[in-house]
Amino acid sequence: MKTIEESIEIEVPVSTAYNQWTQFESFPRFMDGVERVEQKDATRLHWVADVGGEKREWDAEITEQHPDQRIAWKALGQEGPNGVVTFHRLDDARTKVMVQMDYAPEGMKESVGSVVGLDSHKVKGDLESFKHFIEGRGAETGAWRGDVES
C-alpha cells in the first residue's frame, strides 16, 4: 500500500471548505481525471475516473463524517483508495485541508508513477484546483452537515 499525504491552506471559513467538499458530485470540476461521482445515498459513492489512461470504476463508503472536521472513506473492493480529509480552522477566514489516502498501485505504469511521486503531485494539484474553485466562488455550491459514525 502507498500512502499519500498532502495539505493546503484555503482563504475561506472552515464551514465553506467542508460544505463544498461534501458536494461529491462536483469533484470533476476540480479533480483531474475524475469523470463522474454519483452519490448513491448518504454514505455510498460510485466513482468513474481516468487513472493513467485507463478508465476505472469503483464504489466507496463514507465511514466517518463530522461537520467542519473530517470525512473518511473506504473503497469497496480493491479498485479505489481509502482515506480521510480533515479540515482545520486557522482563523475566521482561513482553513487548512489535509488529505491522507492509501491505495495499491496497479500495473507497471501506476507503480512507476508512484515511485517518482506522480500520485502525490496529482493530489497536490487537485487540492490547488479545489482552492482556486472555492476561493473563486467565495461560497459553496451546497452542503451536507450530517454525521456518519461507523
Image (cartoon, helix red, strand yellow):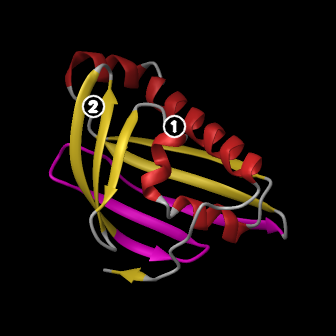
- What amino acid type is highlighted by mark number 1? Val
Q: Work out how far the residue at label 1 is from the one at label 2, CA to CA, in angstroms.
A: 14 Å
81 within the magenta span: yes
Mark 2 nearby-residue class (10 Å; few <14, some 14–19, many ≥20): some
Q: How far from the left and from the top, in percent, is residue 66?
A: 51, 78
Query: Which residue sits at x=58%, y=72%?
Result: 69
Closer-to-camera residue (73/12): 12
Mark 1 / mark 2, whichever is N-terminal = 2
Percent x, y of residue 40:
27, 65
Judged left or right of residue 9, residue 127 is left
Q: What is the magenta range?
A: 63-91
Numbered circle sitting on residue 110: none
Label number found at residue 105: 2
Relative placement, left or right, of 21 versus 91 is: left
The residue sitting at 35% across, 44% down in the picture is 36
Q: Which quadrant holds residue 41?
A: bottom left
